[in-house]
Image (cartoon, rainbow, N blue to C red):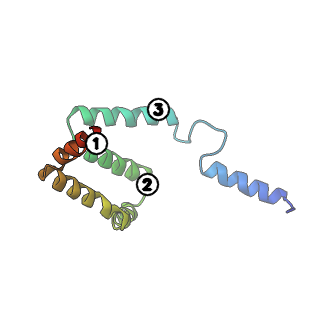
């Protein structure tokens, strides 16, 4: 069994408090997490009521919030490009292409005939 030292516990608790896992509910600037969530929700609702597309609303609000938090936007763009350049996402347009082909060829009529023949 490993030994636990007091220095390790204090390092772990100080790291948790830096990440926001501490016991204080208020941040240093006076804003509470609830107040920040309410402002974000109101901005999201206002943009949706202005009939902004959902993708642009979520993406724009995310970029603005990351900029306000001080994250480097270049790193965010690099991460976004890396996520979009994955082999697994290739299935989405192929699935849409397959559905358009099946709809244009009226395949659903053939399925109805097959199920009717099966009934009897």
Residue 114: x and y in percent read 23, 46
Q: CA distance from mark 1 to mark 3?
A: 60 Å
Q: Residue furthest front?
A: 120
| Element at label 2 | loop
Judge whether residue 50 can be spotted in this image.
yes
Q: Which residue is mark 3?
A: 35
Q: Nearer the viewer, residue 77 or 96?
A: 96
Secondary structure type for disc 3:
helix
> How far from the left and from the top, in percent, is residue 112?
21, 42
Describe residue 37's horizontal placement relative to residue 93 as left or right: right
Q: In the image, what residue occupies the spot 76% across and 54% down? A: 10
Q: Nearer the viewer, mark 1 or mark 3?
A: 1
Measuring 34% from the left and 61% from the top, which residue is drawn there?
A: 89
Q: Quadrant of the N terminus?
A: bottom right
Q: Which mark is residue 70?
A: 2
Say above or below: 98 vs 114: below
Q: Whole-percent x and y of residue 21?
A: 63, 45
Out of 40 and 31, give the one closest to the viewer: 40
Q: Are marks 3 and 2 in contact (CB under 8 Å)?
A: no
For mark 1, give the secondary structure: helix
Q: Earlier in the sequence, mark 2 or mark 1?
A: 2
Image coords of residue 110 (percent x, y): 18, 48
Q: Is residue 31 visible?
A: no
Disc marking residue 118: 1
Q: How far is the residue under mark 3 from the one under mark 2?
A: 19 Å
Q: Is residue 88 above or below residue 103?
A: below
Q: Which mark is residue 105?
A: none
Q: Earlier in the sequence, mark 1 or mark 3?
A: 3
Q: Is residue 79 left or right of residue 47?
A: right
Give the Cα distance between marks 2 and 1.
63 Å
Could you classify mark 1 by the number of other residues whose Cα lies within 10 Å: few (under 14), some (14-19), or many (20 or more)?
A: few
The tag earlier along the polypeptide, 3 or 2, is 3
């Amino acid at each position: 069994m490993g030994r636990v030292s007091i220095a390790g516990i204090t390092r772990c608790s100080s790291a948790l408090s830096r990440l926001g896992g501490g016991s204080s509910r208020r941040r240093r600037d006076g804003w509470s997490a609830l107040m920040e969530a309410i402002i974000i929700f109101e901005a999201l609702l206002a943009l949706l009521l202005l009939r902004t597309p959902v993708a642009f609303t979520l993406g724009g609000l995310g970029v603005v919030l990351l900029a306000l938090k001080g994250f480097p936007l270049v790193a965010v763009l690099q991460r976004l490009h890396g996520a979009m350049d994955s082999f697994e996402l290739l299935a989405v347009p192929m699935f849409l292409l397959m559905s358009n082909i099946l709809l244009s060829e009226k395949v659903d009529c053939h399925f109805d005939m097959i199920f009717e023949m099966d009934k009897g």
